[in-house]
Image (tube, rainbow, N blue to C red):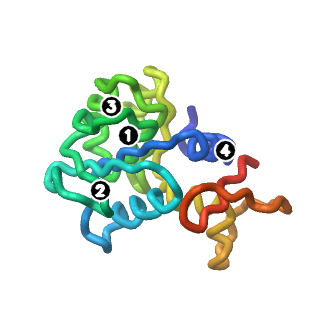
Amino acid sequence: MNHDSYDNTYIAGILNSVKTIAVVGASANDVRPSYFVTKYLIDKGYEVFPVNPGHAGKEILGRMTYASLADIPASVDMVDVFRASGAVPGIVDDVLNLDPLPKVIWMQLTVRNDEAAARAEDAGIKVVMNRCPKIEYARLAGEIGWTGVNSGVLSSKRPVMREGFQSFGIRAK
């Protein structure tokens, strides 16, 4: 797959199909991007599991934090990676040891590792690199336009409400 650009239907399909998300590298510091992305995903109705070995056993945003992906007591649909690109191969190793496998590995802005992505895709896992699910959700739902940003998505369709805080859902097209 070409990871230099993604079709809107690919991203929308992922964000509409996943329900549970593990955020690897989640932070309890409210000025860190991983904190407000975690908060945004929770507010949109996703079940989020923060993963941070330094914060394990404590809560982030009212959610128990786990030391590793293997410690999460439920299956996850998506693993959102807030770690440096060099840490991705080890995270993919951890993901490939999960049963059942997640549907998606999502690497945050500036995070890219093509070799690790190829291994995940060979196992049937969808991969997104160098993108933020918060930004993509807001762009596809039309929320990002509320601040005057051109989302590149035009629609005359009335938004369909989804569970969560001020959530209009994602337009597939």
Q: Are marks 1 and 2 in contact (CB under 8 Å)?
A: no
Residue on which disc 1 sits: 113
- Determine whether label 2 and label 3 are within 8 Å by CB: no
Q: For the residue marked with disc 3, what is the amino acid? A: Val
Mark 3: secondary structure: helix
Q: Is residue 119 visible?
A: yes
The amino acid type, in three-letter code, at marker 2 is Ala
**Residue positioned 18% across, 44% down in the render:** 67
Q: Residue at x 85, y 62 (%)?
A: 156
Quadrant of the frame with the N terminus: top right
Kind of residue sitting beneath label 4: Asp
Seen in the image, is 119 located left or right of residue 156?
left
Q: Give me the C-alpha separation between circle 1 and circle 2.
A: 19 Å
Distance from label 3 to label 4 (Cα)? 25 Å
Q: CA distance from mark 2 to mark 3?
A: 16 Å
Q: Which residue is the site of mark 3?
A: 95
Q: Position of residue 155 (x, y in %)?
A: 81, 60
Q: Which residue is mark 2?
A: 26
Within 10 Å of disc 3 (Cα), the crowding (few <14, some 14-19, many 20+) is many
Whether residue 84 appears in this view of the structure is no
Q: CA distance from mark 1 to mark 4?
A: 20 Å
Disc on res. 31: none
Q: Earlier in the sequence, mark 1 or mark 4?
A: 4
Tell me the distance, in whole angstroms, between the alpha carbons under discs 1 and 3: 15 Å
User: Compared with residue 144, is residue 7 higher up or lower down, i.e. above or below?
Assistant: above
